[in-house]
Image: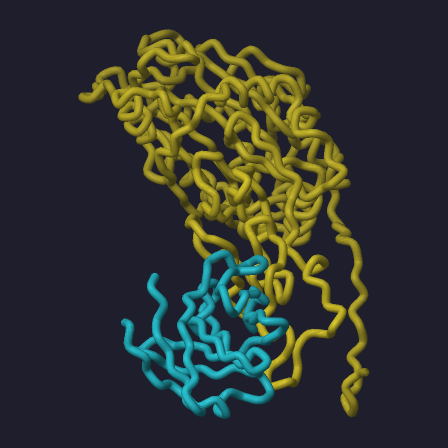
Amino acid sequence: MTCPDTPMPEAAVAAPIRIERRWPKEGHTRIPNWVYTDPDVFRKEMDVFFGGKTWNYVGLDCEVPEPGCYKRNWIGDRPVIMVRTESGEIAVLENRCAHRGAQICWQNTGKVKDFTCPYHQWNYDLNGNLQGVPFRRGAMGKGGMPKDFDPKQNGIRKLRSVNRGGSVWATFADDAPSFEDYCGTEVLAEIDHMLPGKKLKLLGYTRQLIPSNWKMYLENLKDPYHATLLHTFYITFGLWRADSKSECIPTGGGAHSVMVSHNEGKKKTEATSEMSRFRDDLELLDLETVTPRAEFNRGRVGGAWVFPAAQFGIQANSLKTRHVIPRSPTEHELVFTYYGYEDDDEEMTRLRLKHANLLGPAGFVSMDDSEMLNQVQIGVGGYPNGQGVVEMGGRDTQPADYMVTEVLIRAFYQYYREAMGL
Amino acid sequence: MDTWKPVAVVKDISADTHTLRVTLDGEAVCLYNVEGEICATQDRCPHGNASLAEGYLEDGTIECPLHQGVFDIRSGKPQCPPVTTDLKCYDVKVEGDTILLRAQPA
C-alpha cells in the first residue's frame, strides 16, 4: 500500500560515472592534475579499485588475539570490521547495519560478545548473522516485523578474506582472483619475507590525516627519486643514498611494485657531494637511531606496495605496514601499524620501537612526505588542467636496478588509465 | 536469603502476556503464569538488558523482546543464540492468592 495524498517525486535515474576528461597525448609519462581533484574520478576509483577485484589490507591477526576482539578499518571509503570469531578464524564484515546502514562498530578496537547497532539495537553474532530484532513481534500486540521476515536474509555481509602469514586481506569481489594470483610472485615473496609465519606482536600505531589525494601517497612510495633529495635525514646519516644498490620492479601490470635498497652506512661519494643538502659536518649524537641490528633482512630495506592501499616494509629494525584510507579527493588518512615477532628479545623490541621514530607523522623521514604532499595538492589544485611529468629514468615501464627513476609511477599510470578507462 | 517474601497476588499477572515484573530486595524479577504454575526468574535479559516481562511466553519458555533470545522458564537455561548465560531462578510459593519468593542458592 502506498501512502495516500502525497504525490510521488520523480525517480532519479542512476547513471554510471562518466568522466569527461582527456588524458594528455603523451600517455603515462604525464599525469593530469585533475586526477587529484575531480570528485567523479574519486568516486570511480572507490568503485573500480577498492570495491572491485582487488585484495585490500585490513590488519594483522595479532591485533585481534581472542574471539570477540575486533579492529575497525576502511577499504577505500567503505567501513569494515576485522573480528576474531568464536572458532578462532578471522572474519571481515561490512561495518554497516543491515537495517538502516549505521556503522555497528564505532571504536577502532575493542572486544565484544556480539555486535549491536546503537540505532535500533539490531544484534549480530561475530560472523555477521542477524540474531535478534527488537520488537520483532511488536509492542502491546501492535507493530512488529512481517511474519515472513527472515533474519538469515538480513545479516551483515562477510567479505572474502585470507590470512597470509598473519596479515589479513579482504575483497568485495566474489570473482576476484585468489590472493596469491592477485599479488603475483614478487609481491608475495616480499610479504612472506616480512611475515614468515612467525607469530606477530603488535607494537603500536600512528595515524595522521594528510591533506592530499590518496594517490600522491601511493606515488610517493613508488618514487625513489625523491628519497635522497627530500629526505636529508637519509643521506646525512647514510640510511639511503642515490648510489645505493637498488631495485624498482613494477608488477601486477603496474598496480603493485617492489622497491628495495641496501643500507651501506655513511660515506661520501660523488653522488652525495653533489647534493646541496648533504651536510658532512652534521653528527647524530644517538647513532642507535639509525643503526639497525643485523637480522633476517641482512641490510636489505624497502618493501612492496600492494595495490591499492598497503605497503609492507622494513626500515632499520622497524617493521611496519602502511595503510592509506582515502577520505575525499583531497584528503587521506595514513596509518602505520608497527609490529614485531613474538620471539623478539627485549632489546630487539626496543630497537623496533626506536627506529619507528623515522616514520609516522613526526618521523625524522616521513614528516617530509606529508608536508610535501600537501604542497603538491595546493599546487595542482589551482591548476586542474596542468600536468605532471614523469620521465626520470626514461619513458618505459621496465624494471630498473637503480634509484633515480620514476618507472614505478609510469607503470602505475599505465595500469590506472586502463582500469579507469581514461 | 531463606526468608519468603510476598511480592504480588496471582491476578496481578497479566492475562495477556502471562508475565509480571516485580522487585525483590531491589532486584527486578519476572513472574510467569505457565498454565497455572507460577514461576520466577531474573527480569533483566543477560544479553541486551531488556525486561523479560515484556517478552513472549510460549510452551514454558520466554522469548526476550529485544533480540529473540529464548530461555526455559523453569530451569533458566538459554535455548538459542544470542543468549548464552543462565537466568537466576527463584523458589515460588503461593499461599491463597499471594505469591511469595525466595532466592535460590547460587
The reply to whether residue B53 is in sight is: yes
A109 and A154: which one is in front?
A154
- The answer to whether B2 appears left or right of A52 in the picture is left
Using the image as rendered, state which of residue A379 and residue B19 is in the foreground. B19
Residue at 52% across, 82% down = B19
A347 in relation to A98, above or below = above
Residue A132 spot, x, y in % from top left: 59, 64
Rendered location of residue A326, percent (x, y): 55, 47
Which of these two is toward me, A169 or A293? A169
Depicted A182 relative to depicted A270: above or below: below
Chain given the colour yellow: A
Which chain is the one coloured cyan? Answer: B
Above or below for A164 versus A325: above
Q: Residue at x 53, y 12 (%)?
A: A402
Q: Is residue A120 above or below residue A155?
A: below
Q: Find residue A355 and report its horizontal and vertical position in percent.
A: 32, 26
Q: Residue at x 62, y 37 (%)?
A: A161
* Residue A216 visible in the picture: no
Please count the marks in the image: 0
The extreme left residue here reads A285
> Is residue B89 found left or right of B19 in the rendered image?
left
In the figure, is residue A52 to the left or right of A93?
right
Q: Nearer the viewer, residue A20 or A306?
A: A306
Q: Name the image quarter holding residue A343.
A: top left
Whole-percent x, y for residue B92 in the image: 42, 77
Residue drawn 44% across the image and 17% down it: A301
The quarter of the rendered structure image containing the C terminus of chain A is top right
Residue A52 is left or right of residue A228, and the answer is right
